Image (cartoon, rainbow, N blue to C red):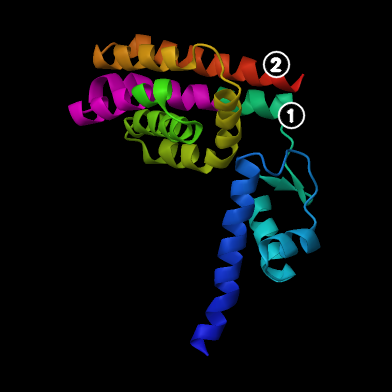
Amino acid sequence: MQHNSSKPSSAYLQSYEALRDMILNGTLAQGSKLIEEKLAADLNVSRTPIRESIRKLEQEGLVVNKRVVKLSQTDLRNTFELRKLLEGHAAQCAATYLSEQELIALERCVDIGRSGTLDEIMAANKSFHEIIMGASNNSLMIDLFERMQSVIFLFRHTVVYYHRPFLIDEHQQICEAIRAHDGNKAEQLMKEHLQADLEFCLHLIR
């Protein structure tokens, strides 16, 4: 009995992860309608775990009214304004608090950004921002940042996939300011970096 009752949960988890990944990697495009019957057939599950997965994705902000979220210019601006506040402060903290081991990890992210595959660059980009965010040592700020990750991923995929100019150069400059313990410069560079991301994304959706 216990084994049988675990099946719906397993099917739900697999369906949720599959749909989330399809949204985040662009397989399911922004604005596309999620049709339960088709998704159930594609993923070889019943409609129940698909329906539960869609409900979960709606809670995360990736689905609205059974459509993949289509982020507006206002959504973009609001998200990046919040990111500049959070990550700008974190970059300033990083210049004081990052350990040598964390600095080396940050520099490794920059190296991967120059020579890695798309997936490797995406992972390195994520790690770069997470390492710096962790330096804030503020659990509330880190939690808010983590809850934004699904939407941030959509933007990150855009700037990496479409090869935004100077993206990795900016990472390197931020890293160098942090290593030099120049908190004010690190904060300013991070805010300028995120503003450039915003302008690039806005240009693509106009």
- The mark total stands at 2
Quick one: SS at disc 2? helix
Q: Give the range drawn in magenta.
A: 82-110
For residue 69, side relative to residue 173 (left or right): right
Q: Which amino acid does label 2 sit on?
A: His
Residues under labels 1 and 2: Cα distance? Answer: 12 Å
Membership of 97 in magenta stretch:
yes
Vertical comparison of 158 with 174: above or below? below
Vertical comparison of 28 with 1: above or below? above
Q: Where in the figure is residue 52, as x and y percent of width and height?
A: 67, 64
Q: Residues within 10 Å of mark 1 (few under 14, many from 20)?
A: few
Of the image marks 1 and 2, the number of the one nearer the N terminus: 1
The reply to whether callout 1 and callout 2 are in contact (CB within 8 Å) is: no
Q: Can residue 60 be seen in this view?
A: no
Task: Specify the quadrant of the image occupied by residue 120.
Answer: top left
Quarter of the image with the C terminus is top right
Membership of 182 in magenta stretch:
no
Residue at the disc numbered 2: 203
Q: Where in the figure is residue 199, as x and y percent of width and height?
A: 63, 15
Seen at 47% across and 41% down, the residue is 146
